[in-house]
Image (cartoon, grey):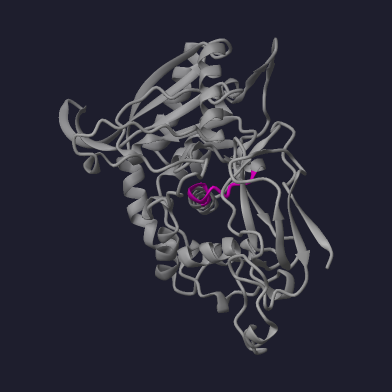
């Protein structure tokens, strides 16, 4: 049998090395083509390493936790039929012990990553047409099925809600998995004074490095304003059921913040600019990063061309970002670039913060929790759902006037959502 090399996927030019996570198969185990053997963690994403051919995992050349580089050979597969191979290592079993061949009407095989997507979306594999080898359901097939509008609008909405990371507990890998480990449970310690030392993941190291870089190289200043969210809430309540029936996705608040931010960026292009050496680079496009918390740390997937995205497209893509961030399955190209960032700490209950700029961008919008507060209107004290907005900006190229007026433009757009439709 021919030996097939298993290699580390091609990494982007900005990534010099990565870390192997725990192997899902041991030497001697049967593997199927496209089955995930191991995951590779970079400082941006986690990449799947599938089996290039079916056969038996002959040897593992790099253990879990090892540092690897792009294209490095990390294992070898003895190509051949998988029937009779041991399930969890060891010598192949006798041919007589092989299970009978599956009938022609057997349900399609979903690859591991695809199976997770389908399970979370509540979709039966036998309802999805696979485009992979031998009719296997790939992750792309599963994502397409999960995002497709369902004949029953309410059911489609429920399926998508189930896929949001906040709705399911993160899976904590067992030691010595190097990406992150379960923290000590204080309740189980009693009076013992124990400590736990866990290596930082590559993602956490990179986030720390970039945040320190931002603080050290940019002249960061933060300005605040408050916005009455009642017009947006009333508009959303009036149309959310029909919106979900028409588009198969729930109408949230983030799409309004994205639209309002793009509206303001068009009026104040300097906020959408960046510094390159002694030059100011003005961007003629609006790629908005959406800060997302995940079990592995903070990631910022980018919503490309946000100015031409509809409300439903924005909601669908943000929901997809959130789900795949929880799985560590965002692609490298989805985490690079971006001209402006929105960080929504309000989903965790944050009332006020000073967000840190994501370099090389020049500004970031912080959105916080909406709470009922007494405010003065026309000489009367009334209760309104108020949200505090924060804009951190690089004072090297953005003056206070532009920063304040930019935030006012967002406030005006949210307090009169018709401006977003009329582009006023």
Q: Quadrant of residue 283?
A: top right
Q: Is 350 in front, or is 139?
A: 139
Residue drawn at x 70%, y 12% as measured from the top left: 277
For residue 41, side relative to residue 156 (left or right): right
Residue drawn at x 75%, y 75% as measured from the top left: 81
x, y percent for residue 211? 51, 22
Range of residues picked out in magenta: 324-331
Q: Residue furthest left?
A: 381
Where the N terminus falls, by quadrant? Answer: bottom right
Residue drawn at x 60%, y 70% as measured from the top left: 87
For residue 264, side relative to residue 277 (left or right): left
**98 to 344, vertically: above or below:** below
Q: Is 321 in front, or is 281?
A: 321
Numbered-mark total: 0
x, y percent for residue 388? 33, 29
Q: Is residue 40 visible?
A: yes
Q: Is residue 243 visible?
A: no
Q: Quadrant of residue 300?
A: top right
Q: Is 408 in front, or is 134?
A: 134
């Amino acid at each position: 049998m021919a030996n097939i090399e298993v290699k580390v996927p091609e990494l982007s030019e900005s990534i010099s090395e990565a870390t192997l996570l725990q192997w899902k198969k041991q030497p001697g185990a049967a593997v199927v083509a496209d089955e995930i053997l191991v995951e590779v963690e970079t400082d941006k994403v986690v990449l799947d390493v599938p089996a290039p051919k079916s056969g038996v995992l002959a040897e593992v050349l790099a253990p879990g936790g090892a540092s690897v580089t792009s294209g490095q050979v990390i294992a070898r597969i003895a190509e051949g039929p998988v029937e009779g191979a041991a399930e969890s290592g060891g010598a192949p079993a006798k041919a007589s012990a092989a299970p009978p061949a599956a009938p022609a009407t057997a349900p399609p095989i979903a690859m591991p990553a695809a199976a997770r997507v389908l399970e979370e979306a509540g979709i039966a594999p036998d309802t999805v047409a696979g485009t992979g080898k031998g009719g296997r359901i790939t992750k792309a097939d599963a994502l397409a099925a999960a995002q497709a509008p369902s004949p029953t609008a309410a059911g489609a909405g429920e399926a998508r809600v189930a896929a949001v990371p906040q709705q399911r507990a993160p899976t904590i890998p067992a030691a010595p998995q190097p990406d992150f480990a379960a923290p000590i449970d204080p309740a189980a310690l009693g009076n013992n004074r124990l400590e736990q030392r866990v290596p930082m993941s590559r993602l956490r190291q990179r986030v720390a490095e970039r945040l320190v870089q931002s603080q050290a190289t940019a002249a960061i200043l933060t300005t605040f304003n408050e916005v009455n969210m009642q017009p947006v809430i009333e508009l959303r309540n009036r149309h959310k059921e029909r919106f979900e029936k028409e588009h198969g996705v729930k109408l949230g608040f983030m799409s309004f913040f994205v639209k309002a931010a793009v509206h303001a960026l068009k009026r104040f292009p300097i906020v959408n600019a960046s510094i390159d050496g002694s030059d100011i680079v003005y961007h003629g496009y609006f790629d908005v990063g959406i800060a997302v918390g995940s079990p592995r740390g903070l990631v910022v997937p980018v919503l490309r061309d946000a100015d031409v995205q509809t409300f439903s497209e924005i909601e669908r893509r943000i929901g997809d970002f959130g789900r795949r961030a929880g799985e560590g399955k965002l692609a490298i190209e989805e985490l690079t670039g971006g001209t402006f960032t929105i960080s929504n700490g309000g989903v965790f209950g944050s009332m006020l913060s000073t967000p840190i700029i994501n370099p090389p961008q020049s500004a970031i919008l912080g959105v916080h929790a909406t709470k009922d507060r007494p405010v003065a209107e026309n000489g009367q004290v009334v209760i309104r759902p108020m949200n505090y907005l924060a804009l951190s900006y690089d004072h090297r190229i953005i003056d206070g006037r532009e920063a304040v007026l930019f935030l006012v433009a967002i406030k005006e757009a949210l307090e009169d959502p018709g401006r977003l439709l009329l582009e006023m």
